Image (cartoon, grey):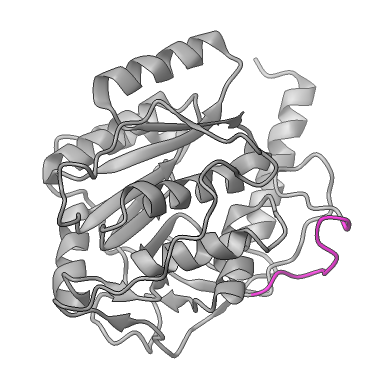
């Protein structure tokens, strides 16, 4: 049974999430596509200027529990998947791995360190079993989501420099990867793109939450304005290789902000000159105006697990956002 404090905490979190992504939210249809597509001989990329041994205020940054899934592909992968994950979301990762196995995807789960010995042992076992864990030497919590996001971009720039597309998805999301691959090759280009930052929808006029003790609380000292600039929800973000490098470079000169969706797709994107493209916009020139994904809520995990043996996930192409 939940005590009164736990119930109050859950209500606070639920209210914050509802306010952040529904009320007072105006969805802007982006009428332009600002990226371009690469051809077979178009492989010029910006230099990697990032310092590999630092991550914001972590001056002796290092990765733990990592192999290099890109190493067997010297010509470069078409797609690499990055999934920031909680150390306690073992079941989420299992479901995503099943989806990866069906189409032979390559991906990494991103996380920080945990002080929980049981969770730490599970992570170490997953790493030795699957070789798909990327852990940084910082504490894993909600305030450090940006650390995980930038850590993933940093790893791509330094260790997977020839991958054409990078998908960042949340660990409560699963994707029809076969359809996504078709989209990358036929709707975009098998040789990659330039300055691509593709998301499902662009959102503007999101209110900054000042209610303390809620997950998305931001103080005036952290961000003084009352509304965020236009940004992309981070459940599904598709980057080109050059965008990863440009955003990573911008992170060295743009002040840290704890909400990674806002930091990466608004603050860094503006500083790097990488414009967002909304897939569900009338101006997107391809017929793929609904990105295939299914939201996995914690309370529905058991239901979603029933889909694990399906070759194609049900309810794809229903825009849930």
Residue 304 in which image quadrant: top left
Q: Would you say residue 228 sits in the magenta stretch?
A: yes
Decide: is 106 above or below 261.
Answer: above
Q: Give percent across and percent down for residue 60.
A: 61, 34
Q: Is residue 59 left or right of residue 153?
A: right
Residue occupying the point 17% across, 61% down = 181
| Front in this rendered view, residue 200 or 260 | 260
Q: Residue at x 64, y 51 (%)?
A: 17
In the image, residue 5 lies in the stretch drawn in magenta: no
Q: Main secondary structure of the magenta part?
A: loop
**Image: 3 above or below 108:** above
| Tally of marks | 0
Residue 251 horizontal/vertical position (percent): 60, 59
Quadrant (top left/top right/bottom left/bottom right) for the N terminus: top right
Extreme residue in the right direction: 221
- Where's residue 266, x and y in %? 60, 69
Q: Which residues are magenta?
A: 220-229
Q: Is residue 307 visible?
A: no
Q: Nearer the viewer, residue 303 or 123?
A: 123
Residue 305 in percent (x, y) is at: 28, 32
The structure residue drawn at horizontal position 57% and vertical position 21%, both measured from the top left corner, is 114
* Residue 301 left/right relative to 24: left
Q: Can residue 300 be seen at all in this image of the molecule?
A: yes
The residue under the point 28% across, 37% down is 68
């Amino acid at each position: 049974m939940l005590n009164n404090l736990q119930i109050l905490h859950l209500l606070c979190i639920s209210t914050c999430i509802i306010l952040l992504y529904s009320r007072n939210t105006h969805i802007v249809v982006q009428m332009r596509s600002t990226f371009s597509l690469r051809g077979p001989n178009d492989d010029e990329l910006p230099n990697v200027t990032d310092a590999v041994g630092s991550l914001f205020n972590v001056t002796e940054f290092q990765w733990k529990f990592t192999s290099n899934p890109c190493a067997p592909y010297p010509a470069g992968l078409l797609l690499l998947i990055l999934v920031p994950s909680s150390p306690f979301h073992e079941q989420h990762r299992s479901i995503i791995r099943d989806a990866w196995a069906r189409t032979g995807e390559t991906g990494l789960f991103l996380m920080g360190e945990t002080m929980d010995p049981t969770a730490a042992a599970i992570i170490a076992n997953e790493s030795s079993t699957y070789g798909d864990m990327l852990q940084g030497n910082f504490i894993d919590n909600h305030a450090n989501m940006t650390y995980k996001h930038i850590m993933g971009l940093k790893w791509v720039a330094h260790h997977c420099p020839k991958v054409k597309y990078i998908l960042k998805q949340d660990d409560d999301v699963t994707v029809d990867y076969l359809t996504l691959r078709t989209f990358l090759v036929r709707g975009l280009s098998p040789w990659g793109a330039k300055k691509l930052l593709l998301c499902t929808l662009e959102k503007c006029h999101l209110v900054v939450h000042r209610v303390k003790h809620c997950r998305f609380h931001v103080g005036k000292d952290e961000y003084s304005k009352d509304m965020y600039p236009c940004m992309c929800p981070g459940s599904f973000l598709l980057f080109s290789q050059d965008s990863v490098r440009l955003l990573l470079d911008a992170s060295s000169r743009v002040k840290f902000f704890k909400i990674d969706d806002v930091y990466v797709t608004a603050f860094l994107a503006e500083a790097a000159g990488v414009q967002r493209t909304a897939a569900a916009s009338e101006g997107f020139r391809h017929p793929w105006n609904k990105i295939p994904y299914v939201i996995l809520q914690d309370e529905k995990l058991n239901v979603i697990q029933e889909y694990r043996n399906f070759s194609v996930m049900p309810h794809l192409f229903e825009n849930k956002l």
